[in-house]
Amino acid sequence: MIRVLVAEDQSAVRAGLVLILRSAPGIEVAGEAANGERAVELARELRPDVVLMDVQMPRLDGVSATRLITAEGLADVLVLTTFDLDEYVFGALRAGASGFLLKSAEAKDLIDAVRTVARGEGIVAPAVTRRLIAEFAGGPGGGRGTRTDPAVLDGLTPRERQVLSLLGEGLSNAQIGVRLEMAEGTAKSHVSRLLGKLDLRSRVQAAVLARELGA
């Protein structure tokens, strides 16, 4: 059972999200939060698998809440965004969000995204992540300001470099396994190791790094 905490300040939107999630087999809504501060409190108390996080919330914004939740290892965070507020999306990426989903997404896409993040495969909604990665890596004001030093890859094995490149393409563990002719579990292990070596919090950050370096 995938336990989800829904953090959204608009009660009608939150009720809709909860209704969709409760209709899905294998998903349980563990709690609801109307502000970022409460989201962090409930994440600590309930230890959900996934936090569905709106970026604009009172008392503590979604980016700050995401940073606290990921820093403490409380849950993976799936951010809801509209893309007319890119600065919030970039902040959530830096804060360690595992995935991004448009608020206009269909119910099926929401459910699929939650399940994807729960599996540890944080790159979801390819149309979202392609734009996010492209703008974060190369767009003015959204990126890191300077390109990352290629020397950060020196500690990776040739296989890990291949995996990083495929993360940059937005592939899942299963797709990486097929491309590199290895078991999905082996691909997942490679992803976990390279995230650790590169001191990254999420696959999305790894994808951005791959794009920045042309890996």
Image (cartoon, grey):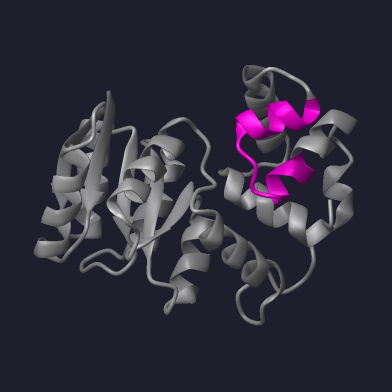
Q: Is residue 189 above or below residue 17?
A: above
Q: Is residue 98 above or below residue 81?
A: above
Q: Start and end of the magenta stretch?
A: 164-180
- Most extreme residue toward the bottom is 140
Quadrant hosting residue 192: top right
Residue at 44% over, 73% down? 83
In the foreground, 106 or 164: 106
Quadrant hosting residue 47: top left
Specify whether 182 is left or right of 49: right
Image coordinates of residue 17 in percent, x first then y, are 20, 52
Total marks shown come to 0
Report whether residue 73 is seen.
Answer: no
Q: Per the image, is 166 magenta? A: yes
Specify whether 161 is left or right of 40: right
Image coordinates of residue 126 in percent, x first then y, are 55, 54
Residue at 21% over, 59% down? 8
Q: Quadrant of the N terminus?
A: top left
In the foreground, 40 or 157: 157
Specify whether 36 is left or right of 155: left
Image coordinates of residue 209 in percent, x first then y, are 72, 54
In the foreground, 145 or 30: 30
Residue at 68% over, 56% down? 208
Q: Per the image, is 198 magenta? A: no
Residue at 63% over, 68% down? 136
Specify whether 119 is left or right of 130: left
Quadrant hosting residue 155: top right
In the foreground, 22 or 59: 22
Image coordinates of residue 162 in percent, x first then y, are 82, 37
